[in-house]
Image: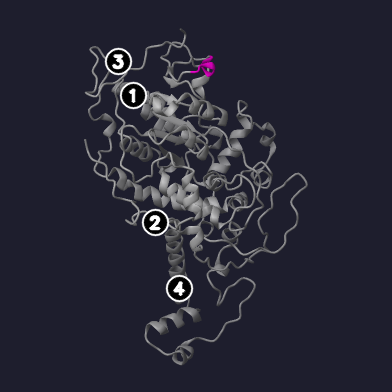
Amino acid sequence: MPQQNTGMGTPGAGAVQSPLEWQQQQQQQQQQQQQLQEQQQGQTPMGQQQLGGAMGLDPSQQMQQQPPQQQVDQFGSAGTDASSQMSPQQDTQMGQPQQQQVDQFGNAAVDASSQMSPPQDAQVGQPQEAPPQEAPPQDTQVEQPPQEAPGQVVAVDPVAPAGDAAAAPTASGSPQESILGLLSNFKDTWDPYEKTDIPMFWHIPKAGGSSIKDTMGGCHRFVQATEFGVTDGHGAETEVAIVYPAVPGVADTDRSPFVNIDSTTVAGIARAKQMGFADAHLAQLVVSPFVFETNDLFTPTAKGRLFSVFRHPIERAVSMFYYIQVADWEPSYKPELKDWTMEQYATSDIVENNWMTRQLSNQLGGELTEENLNKAMEVVRTKFLVGLMSQIERTMSRVEKFFRMTYHVNPTNQEACRNRLMSGGSNSNSKNKKPFTEEDPAWALLAHQNNFDLQLYSYIEALFEEQDAFVEGIPDEFRKIDATCCKCDPPTFPPEGFTCPQAVKNDA
């Protein structure tokens, strides 16, 4: 079996950038691009001064070479810095929203076909405070981003690197060190994989998670730990066990195996811990909307490994808007939104505010700061195998390779099941298959509510590419290698043994 590359990302190796290193790189690239644009336009005293210094000229010579200062009009057309040359739309995305409470659970995920690139100016740095704005309508509780006159922009200073206390992952007593301590029962991403590791899928609402979850449960037929394990009366049991609950409304099909615990509620996690869930080593996959709370599901002798699928924050917000209009099975169902515009939704108290940053920095309410963003980045870097909804097939393949997942039930049927979910998605909402771009008026409003999440997502995109090294040398179709068929006649099994799912019909 191919060996996993475990050298990438180890402390001191420097292959995976820390949040501070990433922010500094983004800042450097932004400054280089700014200087290049200024030199090409011939309107850059600062750029020429830096060039003069590089040529060894003294300050007086540098001053002689500088062109006279130009008058700057309200449109920032001459002699402006990069921040004043930003488009009104990009600059609006940088505003700091009023904070609001967010729900821990969110909603079930749906798939969408389009992927949008994050706005560059919203990915790094913090904006200056915008001029006072008019209050939003009476029925809203969320501050709107700054409104500008046609053609006028609000200047934003270049971002400075975050302070050492907020960004240094190895500093003793740093925020990162303390928050990572809350996840001590999860292995670090660079720790070598072991067969006893328990995959823990953090299910982000509206990020394509249902496709991943259903592929692992329905196609690979893994024993899952989700809320479904306590249906059919299994929630009253006191001993941890594998159960086969009936699927409501579905007949004449094999039931899937679950562990009789609920990993999606705080009470269910406490019950699972009391029952000795982790050390029983029954679950092959745990699914939960929680991160820090699930640390209690595992133990030092039965550690979990976090992985998730991430989606562009604005695309996810749009999907959420359409989903809660029709999802009458969800507590968040709001049919009245069918008569709303996207702008109304983006300025209401229903829209989420930096959901990912709040979850990953363990601060659900209150005002967020750059420190929250750095905490979230460090948690992702240290603890998560990351996937992208925009790269769902590549993500699923990486998960299969990382966790050494192969077919053992009926490979032909399992591959067909997987192909169906990877191409069509699971729990998708066809109404959301409409274009939504940066030109849409609501884009800037949603970016205003997700200013930290946009930066976090950009960091995750970079991690996704770097983490390819974790599965270097493992074939893309590893799932088919040494596959066996316990449902065939005659059945075959791997050398290490395999417990074939019971043929429990749903109508039994």
- Residue 83 percent location from the top left of the image: 55, 68
- Comparing 328 with 115, the one in front is 328
Q: Residue furthest right?
A: 138
Q: Please give the residue where the numbered disc 4 appears in the rendered image.
A: 35
Q: Residue at x 72, y 59 (%)?
A: 133
Q: Earlier in the sequence, mark 3 or mark 1?
A: 1
Callouts 3 and 1 close, C-beta under 8 Å:
no
- Residue 210 appears in the picture as rendered: no
Q: Amino acid at mark 2?
A: Gln
SS label for mark 4:
helix
Marks 2 and 4, the one that precedes in the sequence: 2
* Residue receiving disc 3: 487
The first of marks 4 and 3 along the sequence is 4
Circle 2 sits on which residue? 17
Q: Is residue 65 magenta?
A: no
Amino acid type, residue under disc 4 in the picture: Gln
The first of marks 2 and 3 along the sequence is: 2
- Cα separation between marks 2 and 4: 25 Å
Front position in the image: 332 or 89: 332
Q: Secondary structure at mark 2?
A: loop
Between 461 and 369, the one nearer to me in the picture? 369
Q: Is residue 296 above or below residue 66?
A: above
User: Residue 435: x, y in percent?
Assistant: 53, 44
What segment carries the magenta color? 233-238
Task: Tell whether label 3 touches label 4 (CB within 8 Å).
Answer: no
Query: Disc 2 to disc 3, how far (Cα)?
Result: 46 Å
Q: Is residue 379 left or right of residue 406?
A: right
The amino acid sitting under disc 3 is Lys
Q: Which residue appears at 34% of the width and 25% of the height?
A: 416
Which numbered circle lies on residue 414?
A: 1
Task: Give, as a three-letter code, the residue at label 1.
Answer: Gln
